[in-house]
């Protein structure tokens, strides 16, 4: 009950996915898709993005990238709230500096 009362409203996050042409490459990131994800926090947004782009039935028809994998980078743009980059590592999503996207 308390969780339902304190639950934060869903926010629309602007999400961009960056991938390298092949798995395990460390350079050459390109933008492969941009979408909006509804979530209550950035962490929920990352979880929702991962599940949406790793389950065949949930992937949008116009998505041209591959399944999200270790090394892929997600940009969450909150407008005036800032831009946050996260890279998928073996232990989960880790914040990274945007300099990695080159």
Image: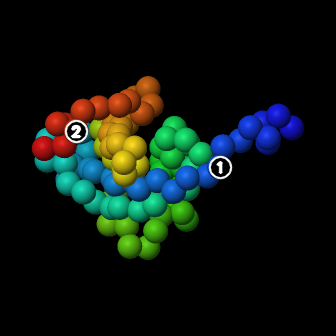
Q: Residue at x 74, y 38 (%)?
A: 6
Q: Residue at x 65, y 49 (%)?
A: 9
**Percent of width and height locating residue 5:** 79, 41
Tell me if label 2 and label 1 are in contact, CB under 8 Å: no
Vertical side of 30 occupied by 47: above or below: above
Q: Residues within 10 Å of mark 1 (few under 14, many from 20)?
A: few
Q: Which mark is residue 70?
A: none
The quarter of the picture where residue 97 lies is top left
For this orientation, the residue located farthest to the bottom is 61
Q: Residue at x 26, y 50 (%)?
A: 19
Q: Mark 2, mark 1: which one is toward the viewer?
A: 1
For this orientation, the residue located farthest to the right is 1
Direction from residue 102 to residue 6 in the image, left or right:
right
Image quarter (top left, top right, bottom left or bottom right) of the N terminus: top right
Q: Give the secondary structure at mark 1.
A: loop
Q: Residues within 10 Å of mark 2 (few under 14, many from 20)?
A: few
Q: Which mark is residue 9?
A: 1
Vertical side of 56 occupied by 84: above or below: above
Q: Give the secondary structure at mark 2.
A: helix
Count of all numbered marks drawn on residues in the image: 2
The quarter of the picture where residue 72 lies is top left
**Percent of width and height locating residue 74:** 35, 46
Direction from residue 52 to residue 64 in the image, left or right:
left
Q: Which residue is mark 2?
A: 98
Image quarter (top left, top right, bottom left or bottom right) of the C terminus: top left
Label whose residue precedes the other's in the sequence (2 or 1): 1
Q: Residue at x 35, y 61 (%)?
A: 34
Residue 14 versus residue 91: which sits nearer the camera?
14
Residue 56 versus residue 38: which sits nearer the camera?
38
């Amino acid at each position: 009950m308390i969780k339902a009362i304190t639950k934060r409203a869903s926010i629309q996050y602007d999400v961009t996915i960056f991938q390298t042409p092949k798995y395990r490459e460390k350079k050459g990131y390109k933008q492969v898709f941009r979408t909006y994800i509804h979530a209550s926090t950035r962490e929920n947004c990352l979880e929702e993005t991962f599940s949406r782009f790793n389950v065949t039935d949930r992937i949008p028809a116009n998505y041209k990238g591959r399944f999200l994998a270790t090394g892929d980078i997600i940009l969450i743009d909150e407008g005036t709230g800032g831009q946050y980059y996260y890279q998928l590592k073996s232990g989960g999503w880790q914040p990274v500096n945007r300099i990695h996207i080159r």
